[in-house]
């Protein structure tokens, strides 16, 4: 029996989402058409937009449906000279000057919010940033559905989200904008999405996204993620008992309730991922979009960890459906793998247990 512990990479479809997809398949009209079928599709589209907006706390803002965070970020960042930090996702860094300083807990120092993009939560470490008012944009992808926030309270001009991080389908997301914000269109042609993104809307994806957003909001209101945080703490306590020299990246900062980034110097993260996969557990060695690349995490290096320690990273991101028994089964399997590695290498103590640079 397999156990999925890679929730930050992507999530299984929620039952509500599967039902929404089935319903969307019955919508035959094009929302740009003026006949009865077209108007019905348009009503469904705008209802979904409102549902996503409410879940994001973005009432009154503009929600533009995209193929996901990567496209939404490009719409905002491609035409601007924006700064960011190395802890950002690669879809953000590709457009930016990644020169902002990062402290040992993964917190970014921002000196010019209007010319900065800063994620709300990090996918690898779970570290939550303190967003300054007036920020140009923020990647909200990992935070959406896992922690309470309202776009309207964040004080940012633009936000990026993807549905598949909260139980929705892949290939659908949104750009969230302060009302009236001017955005150059990357896809031109028709006047869809308030003239900001041409092309017939992905009705199946959009309705499924709305269902996922509503369900995620209910989970937050019901305290589901507080229970997840308790299980994450149980997991971390067990792993640190097994390997007293191990390091949890970002432990000194606020983190997402489901995310553990564990560093065990000298034991390659990729090796651990394969060993745990064979044992029936899906984890990762960092961001899914960076997996398979044989180099240390830029996020961990920016936090001051040396290459050996950074290359040992594994990310365990748990789900609300995970129970204590599954947490303990994973810890047992990891302990066996750790003991084999420890014995083979004659390790008597771990070195490089913290960052090698000063804060900032």
Image (cartoon, rainbow, N blue to C red):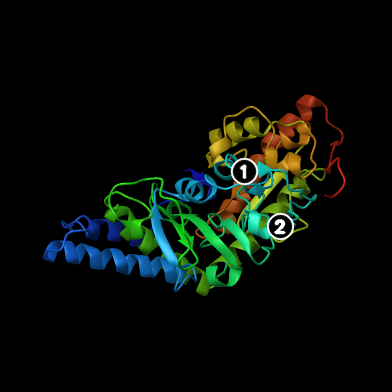
Rendered position, 296 above or below 162: above
Indicate left or right for 76 with 200 as reference. right
Q: How many marks?
A: 2
Q: Position of residue 168 (x, y in %)?
A: 40, 55
Along the line of sight, the residue nearer the viewer: 323 or 15: 15
State which quadrant residue 266 falls in.
Answer: top right
Q: Which residue is situated farthest in the left direction here?
A: 35
- How many neighbours does mark 2 have within 10 angstroms: few (below 14), some (14-19), or many (20 or more)? some
Q: Secondary structure at mark 1?
A: loop
| Residue 23 drawn at (x, y percent) | 23, 60
Would residue 164 be found to the left or right of residue 291 on screen? left
Measure the alpha-carbon separation of dots 1 and 2.
14 Å
Q: Picture quarter containing residue 355?
A: top right
| Residue that badge 1 annotates | 96
Residue 255 shows up from this direction: no
Residue 248, given in percent of the width and then of the height, sits at 74, 49
- Label 2 near label 1: C-beta < 8 Å? no
Q: Helix, strand or loop at disc 2?
A: loop
Earlier-in-chain disc, 1 versus 2: 1
Which residue shows up at 59% across the image and 37% down it? 276
Q: Is residue 76 left or right of residue 324?
A: left
Q: Which mark is residue 130?
A: none
Quick check: 131 above or below 106?
below
Query: Residue 164, image x and y in percent?
Result: 44, 51
In the picture shown, does residue 24 fall above or below 179? above
The residue sitting at 40% across, 58% down in the picture is 64
Q: Quadrant of residue 32?
A: bottom left
To which residue does mark 2 refer? Answer: 112
Residue drawn at (67%, 53%), measured in percent from left and top?
235
Question: Does residue 131 appear in this view?
Answer: yes
Residue at x 27% of width, y 55% of height: 203
| Label 1 crowd bin: few (<14), some (14–19), many (20+), radius 10 Å | many
């Amino acid at each position: 029996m397999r156990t999925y512990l890679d929730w930050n990479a992507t999530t299984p479809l929620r039952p509500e989402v599967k039902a929404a997809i089935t319903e969307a398949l019955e919508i035959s009209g094009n929302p740009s058409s003026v006949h009865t079928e077209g108007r019905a599709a348009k009503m469904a589209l705008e209802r979904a937009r409102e549902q996503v907006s409410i879940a994001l706390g973005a009432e009154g803002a503009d929600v533009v449906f995209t193929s996901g965070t990567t496209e939404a970020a490009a719409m905002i960042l491609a035409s601007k000279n924006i700064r960011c930090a190395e802890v950002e996702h690669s879809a953000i860094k590709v457009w930016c000057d990644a020169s902002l300083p990062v402290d040992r807990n993964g917190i970014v120092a921002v000196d010019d919010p209007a010319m900065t993009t800063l994620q709300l939560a990090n996918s690898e470490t779970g570290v939550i940033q303190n967003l300054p008012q007036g920020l140009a944009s923020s990647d909200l992808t990992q935070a959406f559905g896992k922690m309470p926030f309202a776009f309207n309270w964040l004080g940012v001009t633009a936000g990026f989200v993807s549905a598949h991080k909260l139980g929705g389908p892949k290939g659908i997301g949104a750009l969230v904008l302060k009302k009236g914000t001017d955005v150059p269109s990357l896809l031109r042609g028709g006047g869809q999405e308030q003239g900001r993104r041409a092309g017939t809307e992905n009705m199946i994806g959009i309705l499924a996204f709305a269902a996922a957003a509503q369900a995620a909001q209910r989970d937050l209101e019901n305290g589901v993620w507080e229970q997840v945080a308790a299980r994450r703490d149980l997991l971390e306590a067990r792993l640190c008992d097994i390997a007293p020299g191990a390091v949890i990246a970002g432990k000194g900062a606020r983190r997402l309730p489901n995310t553990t980034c564990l560093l065990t110097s000298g034991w390659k993260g990729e090796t651990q991922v394969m060993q745990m996969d064979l044992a029936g557990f899906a984890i990762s060695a960092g961001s899914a979009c960076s997996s398979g690349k044989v180099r240390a995490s830029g996020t961990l290096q920016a936090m001051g960890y040396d290459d050996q320690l950074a290359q040992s990273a594994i990310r365990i991101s748990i789900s609300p459906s995970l129970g204590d028994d599954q947490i303990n089964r994973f810890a047992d399997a990891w302990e066996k793998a750790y003991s084999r590695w420890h014995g083979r290498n004659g390790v008597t103590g771990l070195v490089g247990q913290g960052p090698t640079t000063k804060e900032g």
